[in-house]
Image: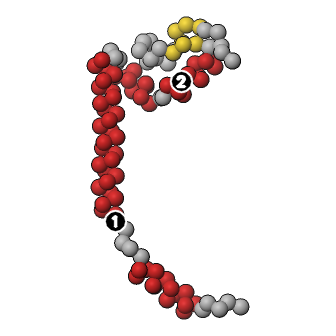
Amino acid sequence: MSLVTKEDRLRYQELVKRERPARPIVRNTVRAFIVGGLICELGQVIQTLFIRYGHFKPTEVAILLSQSSSSLRPASRHLGCTIDLRSGPEQGQRCLSRASPTR
């Protein structure tokens, strides 16, 4: 047998609804827009630096930035090859020289 009645539950829900602070939806939306823009701007700066000073092509930089070097190293070791992101018709996704697999 429950000591809490349906009426008590409804009153409690109304009390919670009244006392709950309003969510700052507009402020959070503006913050998300600004932070997202700053992240994109940082990526653009990094891309420009690679193209201008690293002599990369834009497509090569896109590959480099979309895949972290930490995820490429184990894959290249497993395949037993060296990956050069700056050359090749396959946009840097080919093996240039066979190396002995490391274990």
Q: Does residue 90 show up?
A: no
What kind of element bears circle 2? helix
Callout 2 touching callout 1 (CB < 8 Å): no
Residue 58 at what x, y percent from top left?
34, 22
Is 10 displayed left or right of 63 in the figure?
right
| Residue, disc 1 | 24
Name which residue type carries label 2.
Leu
Query: Which residue is drawn at the image coordinates 28% and 19% (left, top)?
Result: 52
Compare marks 2 and 1 and give the one earlier in the sequence. Answer: 1
Q: Is residue 13 above or below residue 70?
A: below
Q: Does residue 77 show up?
A: yes
Residue 74 at what x, y percent from top left?
59, 23
Rate crowding at label 1 as few (under 14), some (14 to 19) or many (20 or more) other CA atoms within 10 Å. Answer: few
Looking at this rendering, what residue extends furthest in the right direction? 1
| Residue, disc 2 | 72
Label ID, residue 56? none
Q: Is residue 65 above or below residue 95?
A: below
Residue 92 at what x, y percent from top left?
46, 17
